[in-house]
Image (cartoon, rainbow, N blue to C red):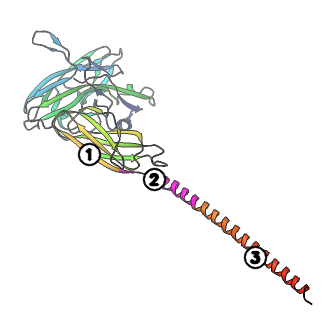
Amino acid sequence: MHLIQNKLSLVTTGRSVLSRIIVALSFGAAIVTFSPAHSAAAVDSGGGLSIAPVSSGDNNGGVTNRSTFSYKLDPGAIQTDSVVVQNLAEEDKTVVLYVANAFTTASGLIGVKANDQAKTGPVDWLKFTTKLPNNTFVLKGLSALTVPFTITIPPNAPPGDYAFGIAVAPDATDPSATPGGNTIQILQAAASLVELRVSGPLIPIVRVGALTVSSEAKLVPGFVDGSTKVTFEVVNIGNQRINAVIQLVERNLFDTVIHREPAIKLGNVLPGSRVKLTRSWDNDPYIKGSVSVEITTGTATSATRSVNFWSVSWRTFVVPLMLIAAIFALRWRIRKHRRDRDAAELAALKSGTAGSAGAAQSESAIGRP
């Protein structure tokens, strides 16, 4: 099962809901997440509200506490159940109860989207049977309300795994939620996860989606380390929830493995999910390299994708060019110095030869009769 206490935060200024800002910060989703192996308990929003599946009787007449709603149903089936919403605070609260799609986070948890996000698929299959205008009601302080619901599976529902959440949050349109009119208030929600499998063939299919590699430029390849940054997507295009193990391997220009990233474990990849991950490390692939992404799932499906990249920049060429230019300039100066020295020596030699010849002519003239 998948349950962990967490919070959904929506910011309101006056009576205007700024949930789109929160959505932008949390990649379009509310921060209500579920992880494996958590004890069965109500999820506390941290804002005085909690939600949990209603306890159910077992075959021995006892009571079973559930951490999530979990069903395996045939197309056309109808499932009834109830959720318990509790106000942990002493003051009354106006709350909204809603159903929203689930998604897989980058850490392998299951999150529940905010109420104002687009809702598709199984969300429409669940209907509350208690009449609640706009699913909004007043919950007395230190009280609880059990809300029954019905899940109706369409006769033509595709087989596979589905996930969504039943959430409760303070009503952001309630004037009492923003005392003073201009106060910024944090509205925190709680959610219970609904895990649903519709009977039929399960087809797990995983793919490596968008894959990009950027390399921090090396000043001198082979001598000064740089870094590689890899961004990729794990895409579940099948109809079964999978647990992925991802291996990243980098090779250099000579196809030698220069880095092997520790295995990345990404659980709870829901059908239709596209999970974006980023990893970076120090390296030096020597001008050109490649990175491969391999995904295994423990099922019949796996995926591999690789991309080549250049690990150079203008600085990589400028430094050698500057060295070459400096060498040529030094050689030119040495040669010029040698030419100037040779010219000076030749001039001095010519000057000395001319002086000797003049002196000899003078001596010859003096010695004539």
The stretch in magenta equals: 309-327
- Identify which amino acid the numbered label 3 is placed on: Lys
Q: Nearer the viewer, residue 229 or 226?
A: 226
The residues bearing labels 3 and 2 have C-alpha atoms spaced at a distance of: 55 Å
Give the residue at mark 1.
305
Q: Would you say the residues marked 1 and 3 are in contact, meaning their CB atoms lie under 8 Å apart?
A: no
| Residue 360 appearing in the image | yes
**How far from the left and from the top, in percent, is residue 209?**
26, 45
Check the picture and name the quadrant holding the N terminus: top left
347 shown above or below 174: below
Dot 1: within a 10 Å radius of its alpha carbon, few (fewer than 14), some, or many (20 or more) residues?
Answer: some
Which disc is residue 350 wearing?
3
Is 21 left or right of 124, judged from the image as shown? right
Instruction: Give the residue displayed 28% in from the left and 17% down from the top.
Output: 86
Is 180 left or right of 261, judged from the image as shown? right
- Identify which amino acid the numbered label 2 is placed on: Ser
- Identify which amino acid the numbered label 1 is placed on: Arg
Which disc is residue 313 wearing?
2
Residue furthest bottom in the image: 369
Dot 2: within a 10 Å radius of its alpha carbon, few (fewer than 14), some, or many (20 or more) residues?
Answer: some
User: Quadrant location of residue 249?
Assistant: top left
For label 1, the SS is strand
Q: Nearer the viewer, residue 272 or 223?
A: 223
